[in-house]
Amino acid sequence: MINYRLMTIEDVEAVHAIEVDVFPTPWTLNAFYQEMTSNTQAHYIVAVDDTDKIIGFCGMWIVFDDSQITNVAVLPEGRGKGIGEALMRHAIALSKDKKVNVMSLEVRVTNIVAQNLYRKLGFSDGGIRKGYYTDNQEDALVMWVNL
């Protein structure tokens, strides 16, 4: 069984390890510590398995009535089990609790699996950010949903 909860500073190293495993240009460990200690707009949810291992996370910045998803990642062994969707649903619920009106995110134009998940959750295409990803200059599709 997977449980979902807010991330704490004690989770930073485990979340960073997932970030490094999943993304070609991962955030630094210090960036996650900064998110937990200095960024009052940062909110993170973690997915924890029944052995108490963090297997996924979703981060967002909530500024006034806008929520921007910063990163969503699930370890390869946890994919295809609805964990990413559940993380996003928890992020949406938290955003609604905080009176957010609009949630947005960027996703690689080649990441069709993620795009399909976001569309399933009600996100619409909003535009393209040319050369957004620094590792290969890939474009990002901006997606948004009214909450």
Image (tube, rainbow, N blue to C red):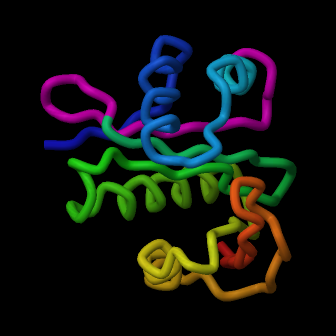
Tell me where residue 125 appears, x and y as whole percent. Answer: 69, 87
Seen at 55% across and 60% down, the residue is 92
Q: Which residue lies most toward the front here? A: 136
102 and 81: which one is in front? 81
**Relative to 104, residue 75 above or below:** above
| Residue displayed at 82% across by 58% down | 65
In terms of depth relative to the viewer, which is nearer, 65 or 122? 122
Q: Quadrant for residue 40, please give it.
A: top right
Image-based side of 41 in relation to 145, left or right: right
Q: Residue 118: x, y in percent? A: 51, 76
Of residues 42 and 34, which is closer to you in this image? Answer: 34
Q: Please give the name of the residue rendered at 56% of the width and 37% of the height, measured from the top-left corner.
A: 44
Q: Say which quadrant the C terminus sits in.
A: bottom right
2 displayed left or right of 127? left
Above or below, 57 against 89 in this view is above
Toward the viewer: 40 or 141?
141
> What x and y, as percent, mark residue 146?
69, 78
| The magenta stretch spans residue 29 | no
The quadrant of the picture occupied by the N terminus is top left
The stretch of residues the image draws in magenta is 37-54
Q: Position of residue 8 (x, y in %)?
A: 52, 19
Number of marks drawn:
0
Residue, x 80% and y 85% (percent of image)? Answer: 127
Taking the magenta stretch, the answer to whether it contains residue 51 is yes
Q: In the picture, residue 34 is in which quadrant?
A: top right
